[in-house]
Amino acid sequence: MSQTKRVLRLVMPLIAIVCTVIFVPWLMLWVWLSPLPATVQQEVEQATNYKLDGMIVYVDEGGKAPVLYASGWKDRDSQIPSDPHAFFKIASISKLYIAAAACKLVYQQKLSLDDTLDKLLPQLNGRIANAERITFGMLLRHSSGIPDYLADSNYPWDSPIKDNWETIKLVWDKPANFEPGTSHSYSNTNYVLIGEILDRMLGYSHHQFIREEILFTLNLSHTYSLLQELDPKLVSSGYVIGYDKDVKLNDYVSPGGSMVATAEDVGIFLRALIDGSLFNKEEQAIYSSVYYYEHTGLLPGYQSIAKYHQDIDTIVVQFVNTSGGESWTISEIIYNRIIKILRRQKNV
């Protein structure tokens, strides 16, 4: 063996160790390895030690009264503490509401899961690949193959597009990610198109349909389709790591990402979506064939998780008003730790 090879055999493991020490995400590791506290409130309070400005958690255990927890800041600049009843941009959790509305319209036979995109929105002919083979059901299931407009590196996050058709044009004439119905790839474009389809079919805004058929039915008086519908003072501020300004007033209006709600309202909606109180039997079957019973959401300054945990019959909704850096992974770790605490308490 040459002298060079001998040196490399000795040096390479040391280099690997040094790189591990330098590049390991220590903050995430610290969150993950920290001793699990006894209560959810303690875990929520610890969240602000990990570069998260504020956190809201809603816990609905079957058979018990729901509980809200909060820590950190609702408005960091004005030193206003986190308010568990504050409104929050729920981002892609909005897709659950749109999917539910779509399934109600399919049940009413105003739409069919087999309707093709070229018939539903004729102006897309020749502009969206495979429009003649993409069905309404494929849009709902994220199996259309249409690219995600948010993958466009030029999307103006600091000044979101306000016109749905301008958003749709970001993917015009782009090749499909895959043949329709052959795979699955989450694409926000699917739900912008669904919003336009619903508006066209209804003859009025799908937001109004959601309000009348879902929000009023469930008495969700703290859920809105758009930020502009309520006083922004009621909305939690949002912060991006590495950016000093509050991004609360950045208004995202694209269908599937525009809604604003309290954690409690999201939890009530999710429980109704799951337990059958939102749908009749046929509607429930349609929904089960096309979409999820949980969701996460992410916008600059806001991240959210809403899930049902069947083994403990518990819904947990978590809001964090910080994004960027390692905050998403840290938020997920904290969420999973909360579930561990709840399971432990359930088994005591």
Image: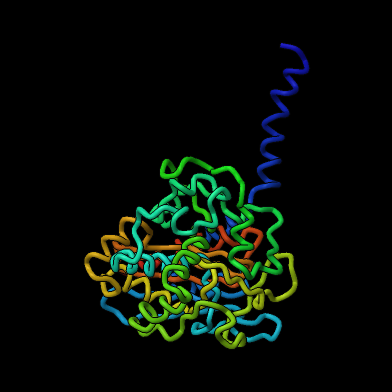
Q: Position of residue 186 (x, y in %)?
A: 49, 53
Task: Count every numbered label the image shows and give the total.
Answer: 0
In the orientation shown, which residue stands out farthest toward the top? Answer: 1
Residue 175 locus on image (x, y percent) = 58, 42
Out of 237 and 79, give the one closest to the viewer: 237
Residue found at x 54% / y 43%: 177
Q: Relative to residue 287, is residue 247 drawn left or right?
A: right
Picture quadrant where residue 75 is located: bottom right
Foreground residue among 107 and 80: 107
User: Foreground residue, 65 or 237?
Assistant: 237
Q: Position of residue 47 (x, y in %)?
A: 56, 70
Q: Which quadrant would residue 277 be assigned to in this image?
A: bottom left
The reply to whether residue 48 is in sight is no
Q: Is residue 134 above or below residue 69?
A: above
Task: Give the answer, above or below, for where 227 lies relative to 117.
Answer: below
State the image quarter where residue 45 is shown. bottom right
The residue under the point 66% across, 78% down is 249
**Front in this rendered view, residue 33 or 67:** 67
Q: Is residue 68 left or right of residue 64?
A: right
- The quarter of the rendered structure image containing the C terminus is bottom left
- The colour scheme is rainbow
- Report x, y in % for residue 66: 36, 80
Split into 4 quadrants, where in the image is the N terminus? top right
